Amino acid sequence: MEVVQEDKLKTLSYSGVFLSCFSDFSEKCIHATPEHVLVYLYSGEQIIEDRNNKIKLKAGDCAFIRRDHRLKMYKNSKGEELYKGISLTFNRTVLRDFYSKMNKSEIPKEIKISDKTVFKLELNPAIQSLFQSLIPYFDSNVKPTEGIIQLKVLEGIYTLLNSNELLYPILFDFAEPWKIDLLEFLNDNYMEDLTMEQIASFTGRSLATFKRDFKKISNLTPQKWLIKKRLETAYIKLKEEGQKVQDVYAEVGFKNASHFSTAFKKQYGISPTEVQN
């Protein structure tokens, strides 16, 4: 379980799948998730700005947000009600597995892919049941088991499919299905000693295609992205977990302490030892 506390904003993230948060002030953020998200508003108010469209969610409302789109979100308290939202994230691996087990004859035919980014869903018993079953975890901060999380994600997929047929081609749009998602692979393997050629191969790409695809997701080169990610992890291990420099640098993927120290000071302006102390 990951808990992030900043002033009066609190976020609880369970395995990156079940997310809940609340705030007693207005919070503006830029939403740019690489995965589809189903959002349920428990209390307060949420305003989503998508280009020239503005979608307002109040307590009890639910919306589906498709992946790879940038949106502005405003999470507001309403009167004495704090903002509280619960969301489920659906990654492509789970969706591919779900799709592979579906009876394809049950899939609606000739549904065109909508260009909408946000779908506000009509409240129905399936949506109510799904999120009402998650609220006790939200209120008590008791961590749900991995099994419960997996079941809730599957329930969320069924709920979406039963709520709007337009979501079939969106959920199961696996463009370039032979390619592994770059960010997912890198986030899982950034501490490993892999060459760019190996990363390209493991994600089903030529080196040239890997570099081209990477430019779509980051302004950094792959090498700089890996170093930045490793240093961020190292900072947490030193600052928050109290680990020692000699234990951290190799664990996060650096081959020697000198290179690690130089890169760390360049990014953070202080040495790893200073952070540790």
Image (cartoon, rainbow, N blue to C red):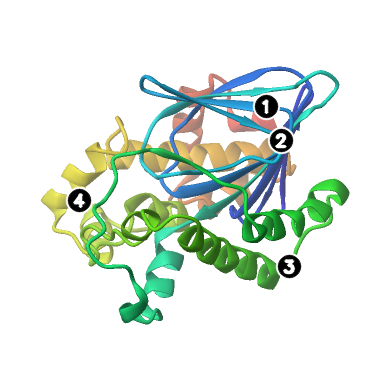
Tell me: 179 left or right of 133: left
Q: Is residue 5 visible?
A: no
Q: From mark 4 to mark 1, how far is it between C-alphas?
A: 41 Å
Q: Are marks 1 and 2 in contact (CB under 8 Å)?
A: yes
Q: Amino acid at mark 2?
A: Ala
Q: Which one is in front, 81 or 253?
A: 81
Tell me: 172 left or right of 262: left
Relative to 108, does residue 3 appear above or below in the rendering? above
Q: From mark 3 to mark 2, how far is it between C-alphas?
A: 27 Å
Q: What residue is disc 4 on?
A: 210
Numbered disc 2: secondary structure: loop
Q: Which mark is residue 145?
A: 3
Q: Which one is in front, 227 or 178?
A: 178
Q: Earlier in the sequence, mark 3 or mark 1?
A: 1
Q: Nearer the viewer, mark 4 or mark 1?
A: 1
Q: Amino acid at mark 4?
A: Phe
Q: Nearer the viewer, mark 4 or mark 3?
A: 3
Quarter location, residue 99: bottom left
Q: What residue is disc 1 on?
A: 45
Q: What residue is disc 2 on?
A: 59
Quarter location, residue 238: top right
Q: Earlier in the sequence, mark 4 or mark 1?
A: 1
Q: Nearer the viewer, mark 3 or mark 1?
A: 1
* Residue in the picture at 37% in, 69% down: 96
Q: Amino acid at mark 1?
A: Glu
